[in-house]
Image (cartoon, grey):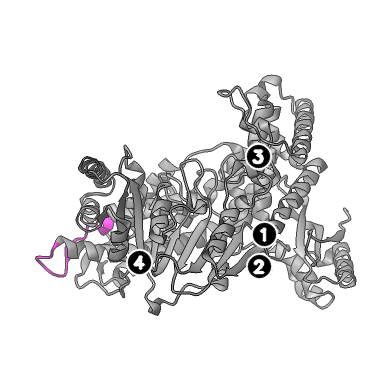
Amino acid sequence: MDVYRASKSRSQNRKGWYVTFRHPLRKDATGKVGLKVRRGLGTADDQEADLLVKQMNELLLDDTLWSIHAKSRARSLYDERVIAAFYEDLEPMQMTDLKAVRERELPYPRREEDYNQIRFTGGHERYEGLRQLLGLADEPFLQSNAIHAPHYELEWIACDSPTYEAVVTFLPFEKTKAYMEECVIKAAISYACDGGDHELARHFLQHEHEPFALRQLIGTTPAFYVTRFTATQPNVSVNEHVQEYIEIIRSQALQVRERLMETHDFTEKQFTYPTDDVLLAFEETWRGEIEFTLLIDALMEEVEKRFHSLPQGRWTYTSEEWPECWRFQAKDPNVTLRILSILTSQDESKCGKLLTPLVEGIRVRGSFSGRKGIFTVGPEKNDRVLSTNTMKGIDQSHTLVWVQETKRDSYDHMLPTLRYLISTGQIEKLHLYMHGDESEEWKRHAGQALEIVLNDVKRELGWTAYSQAERQILRNSLYFSVEEVYERTIHTIEEYELPSVHPIYTNMMLSLVVKDACDAFYQKLETQDGLREKALCRRFAELGEDEYGGMKPQALMFTTITETFYRSFFTQPSGWSHEDLTNDKREEAIAAICMHFSKALRTYLQTNVCHQQIGEWQSAYGRNGKNAKKKRAQDLNVIFEDVLPSSHRLIDQPKCVKHLYGLMKEAIESSGGILLS
């Protein structure tokens, strides 16, 4: 039996100790037992830390305690801090809600204080609306373009306050480590597959699928900026540590390649045109090397140093002794803005000195432009399916302001948001701010572009959707001034009232609607490369997230179901409780049902796709060896089929129809509608 040992350490400039050890029951990404764990000991005393490490070593030697069922017996023997460090890792990991952390540190005003929550959305222009509203048009930390769009959530509480406060939350330890490992693995693979120094540097210093720029944290190298289309290198300083890391990756990549050619009979051609078998075998082998572990540990220590560059403030830390949030206060708004600029800088000349990639969210409170409200903007991608976090941001806002550049040729990127607002009964939140040229020519262009988008809405969701969107955009909420947007939306908080008219439905068509939703989901569900699918499984299994690299199975399932029910059921009632109703009244009643249904469906999917199948996600992530991709694909299919089976299996899984029927019935009846059996 392997012997597991614990040791203590502390971060630079930190007084508290933490313990590191290989867990005897948790598997690493290669499927081997002995995942490296780091947990804070909650003490700065050297002798006390030694005692806790001693207790941990005793626990690691007694395999009769290596079970969650032995936790109560271990409690009678060891300190609670040792118990937490060992047994927390035997239960499904729940990632900290960092928005809740910001709320704890700097809470939103109470609802009765009449603070409207206005969220800015759209392309990278969405920051322009916020800048103008706050009178901060020249502030660099709010600057955005198509290349450098901020990746963090920004929440601004504009109020009458003598001071300026801010709280900044950071990426969790495990998520930062995951990004780091993925950068290192991709860099090694690219070099082993004849990518050259540029490909190695590019993948190492910039995550392939996430806005994680490692070069901003540790430094950069000229090779990063070289492409097939550039003949010269920019004038950037070379960081010696970065060169050392690159040398390690280069050397290990070649060694792993040679080993795989011997053990797996891979050929030179297979590395030139790598298949999933080659990529996954390389990843598994590279992860298992001690050099990989040492490199990741060194990088994490280097990255942790960036936190020390911040001025004095109040820190809180996680159980891994990793910074969770930092709060500061100032009387001068310029001081606050200067610090925020440091935290969010994208200046390439400062690579190796920045903290930007680790910033997850910022909440600011203070007086700006004399306006009052809660203004938010978040990271968004122009994908056909909105992310779960983007959806939640919309749900939590009272008003959604879409900022649109008038001169943009196409407005197609509005479509996913419009579909979401309509199918979830929230279209009345939408207000459109046209930013840029206000000439009559460009106003006509904007109207024509919007009409094209509305026709797309009609094609995908039907005439009722077109009517709802047209009324909201063209009649009520098209502005060419951010001041007008503010004046029209700041007092839109209203108490919800049941509609005065009631649609009448029968459940005869429900099975066909569910079948349509199943067919649509599996038609849109795309197969990806093996490394990306494995990274997705890691998000569900360990990081408490539901998407990666454009793959959003839970969000896709939610979108497919809500849009199908909207188009084929909720907008097709058998009758109404009153005659001679206006379209506005009918649409209002349908929107109320859609809103209730979407809220219940989100909770249902979060429970059944994520929480109740955590073991299945962990098994899928742990797949290694021959045919790992095929087996993982089968695992994913089982997970999805358990919640939303393919149409030919619906008859074998009536619980799906039963669950969706329950959600639909509750939504209709709680909104004043009538459902006939």
Q: CA distance from mark 3 to mark 2?
A: 29 Å
Could you tell whether 169 is left or right of 554 in the image?
right
Q: Are marks 1 and 2 in contact (CB under 8 Å)?
A: yes
Query: What label sits on residue 310 in the rendered view?
Result: 1
Residue in the foreground of this view, choosing between 645 and 5: 5
Q: Which residues are magenta?
A: 569-582
Q: Earlier in the sequence, mark 1 or mark 4?
A: 1
Residue in the foreground of this view, choosing between 450 and 375: 375
Q: Secondary structure at mark 2?
A: loop
Please indicate, yes or no, whether residue 515 appears anywhere in the rendered image. no
Instruction: Identify the residue at horizontal 76%, vertical 63% (top origin).
Output: 39
Could you tell whether 97 is left or right of 624 in the image?
left
Kindly identify the amino acid type of the residue bearing the numbered disc 2.
Gly
Could you tell whether 643 is left or right of 201 in the image?
left
Please indicate, yes or no, whether residue 602 appears anywhere in the rendered image. yes
Q: Secondary structure at mark 1?
A: loop
Question: Which residue is label 4 attached to?
Answer: 596
Query: What label sits on residue 313 in the rendered view?
Result: 2
Question: Which residue is label 3 attached to?
Answer: 205
Q: CA distance from mark 1 to mark 4?
A: 44 Å
Kindly identify the amino acid type of the residue bearing the numbered disc 1.
Leu
Instruction: Identify the residue at horizontal 44%, vertical 77% (top origin).
Output: 110
Kindly identify the amino acid type of the residue bearing the numbered disc 3.
Leu
Mark 3: few, some, or many residues within 10 Å (few <14, many ≥20)? many
Instruction: Identify the residue at horizontal 48%, vertical 69% (top origin).
Output: 366
